Amino acid sequence: MPRSSSPDPAPISPALLREWRIGAEDRGTVLVVGGARTVPGAPALSGTAALRAGAGTLQVAVAERHATALGVSVPESSVFGLPETPSGAIAADAADRLAEVLPGAGTVVVGPGLTGAEETEDLLRRLVPAIAPDARVVLDAFALGALSRAPSLAEPLAGRLLLTPNRVEAAFLDGCEEKDVDDLETAVRIAGRYGGVVLLMGVVAAPDGRVWRDGSGHVGLATSGSGDVLAGLTGGFLARGADVDQAACWATHVHAVAGQRLIPDTGSTGLLARELVAEIPRVIAELER
């Protein structure tokens, strides 16, 4: 399995990924937890990306008011409605609603479409103890802000945690200003601090110091919803049995190449996140030949 012990990042390339293949025999369950009142589409993007990456079963947990609509828009999913706070965030007692679901989810993606800093922290404190001890966990968006305020939540997830911050979220996790974020150095520090693999703007950093970097280019991928697609991609690869660092490397490359393929038609400013989802299986198929 290709690894780098050098402080210089190993390049993520088609050649590396073809040598570091992900099996197709295991196609486990991904549970996406998100979708507060004002952001119902984020978990749909994450969930469909997970399916496109090869997850066998998709479960999506969103605000009760959105559950039926999401189930219709993503008919491949099982949908669970969650209680809201008065402000529209997902309430902490949503963890009780998921008590029967969490033990069977081999991969849990928390964050797409969550809102409310304090509410998300309360939710995460309730969710983490209920997650199966062998499940892999992806934290994205507001869940990363919650982790920055309660870093001890990462301790029981050591060895099975993947963080997918953008630069704003990376600054929270690293305790710095956004202008001071250096993708490589910041990713390495965050990985060491929280004991998880970090995927930041094409850089993948493992807590033991190994680092990879994708050189495919990420122009146009700052569009709304792109991060939700990326988080779902990592979950889908984890559901296929990938190691956490392996899933991150595959996800960042597939995500970037899918965007590159679309830009000639959409331009760098016209790309929609849902278009990335449709391109994902073609990119994966080429890498798996």
Image (tube, helix red, strand yellow):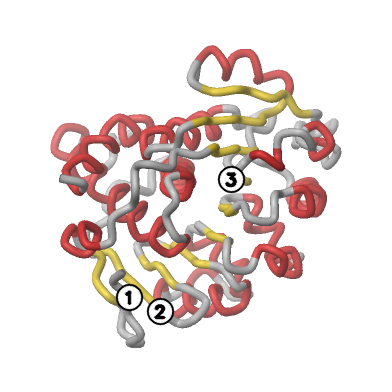
Disc 3 or disc 2, which is closer to the eye? 3
Q: Residue 32: give x, y in percent of width and height.
A: 59, 38
The label nearer to you, 2 versus 1, is 1
Q: How crowded is mark 3: few (under 14 residues within 10 Å), some or many (20 or more)?
A: many
- The residue that disc 2 covers is 210
- Which SS class for mark 3? loop
Q: At label 1, which amino acid type do we have?
A: Arg
Q: How crowded is mark 2: few (under 14 residues within 10 Å), some or many (20 or more)?
A: many
Q: Mark 1 points at which residue?
A: 3
Give the Cα distance between marks 2 and 1: 7 Å
| Dot 1 alpha-carbon crowd within 10 angstroms: few under 14, some 14 to 19, many 20 or more | some
User: Does label 2 or label 1 sit earlier along the sequence?
Assistant: 1
Query: Of helix, strand and loop, which one carries label 1?
Result: loop
Q: Do the residues labelled 2 and 1 touch (CB within 8 Å)?
A: yes
Which sits earlier in the primary sequence, circle 3 or circle 1? 1
Q: Are marks 3 and 1 in contact (CB under 8 Å)?
A: no
Q: How far apart are marks 3 and 1 (CA)?
A: 25 Å
Callout 3 amino acid:
Gly
